[in-house]
Amino acid sequence: MAKRLSDWRMVYDEKYITSHYGEMSSYRRANGMQAHSGTDWARSLGTRIPAIAKGTIHKIQYSSVLGWVVVQTAMDKDGIIWYLGYCHMDKKPGYKVGQKLRKSQTVGILGNSGQSSGPHVHVTASRTLEGVFGVTSDKVDVYKLILANVKVPVRQKPVVAKAPEQAPVPEHTPTPEPEEAPARADVAPTLRPPRRRPPVKDISKLGRFWHLFSGKK
């Protein structure tokens, strides 16, 4: 069978659960009672009870054990119809059989009617209407049934835009100082020409030494 879209919810947060389906307390053993037939959520008296799923109100009844009870039908993800019972309500709710319920719509007010040790809502699930008021074996674990039909949104990871890659900056390399060129052995040193005396234009100014330049003694 093709999967259907279901959208159920927990009655309250898990931290308010005081007893699960199938638990056998010492009190139950001592009094010869059956295992717990549903899931209990304990809240303050007068807290509104939200509908687990959309459906139809199928029965409103008072029970000496379960107190005021409202039974609604709900379809799971496989198209199976379940009967969900909300028990120990404070008073008879103002609904009529056949009325439609929306998910999270108030079903009734949390109370302490019937055989109850304190304000809480006892929720059961069965494939039949009679099973809601029957023994534990007529029911299933409503907590697990809800978990199997809660519509969990698929969270997409946020897309983070990557910054454009930049060219790597080269590390600074110090510029080497120029080395002195070694002296070449095959290159002769530069010689300066000898300094020449300027010529004497007037030889008569040489005085008594003129004959040295004229060739006379």
Image: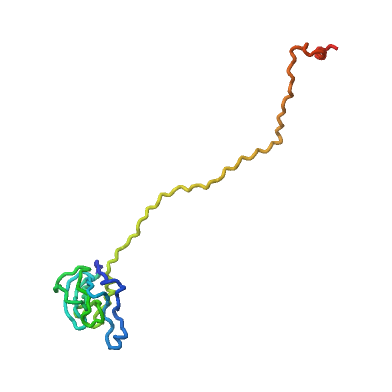
Q: Position of residue 151 (x, y in %)?
A: 27, 66
In the image, farthest residue toward the right:
217
Left or right of 84 in this view: 174: right
* In the depicted structure, whether residue 212 falls above or below residue 157: above
| Of the pair 3 and 204, the residue shown nearer to us | 204
Quarter of the rendering containing residue 152 = bottom left
Residue drawn at 28 percent across, 88 percent down? 31
Q: Quadrant of the C terminus?
A: top right
Q: Is residue 75 left or right of residue 27?
A: left
For this orientation, the residue located farthest to the front is 45
Residue 44 x/y as whole percent: 25, 74
Image coordinates of residue 4 in percent, x first then y, are 24, 67
Question: Whole-percent x and y of residue 47?
Answer: 23, 72
Viewer can see residue 137? no
Foreground: 164 or 215? 215
**Which of the 4 image quadrants contains residue 125?**
bottom left
**The N terminus sits in image quarter:** bottom left
In the displayed structure, 205 sits above or below 150; it is: above
Q: How many labels, in total?
A: 0
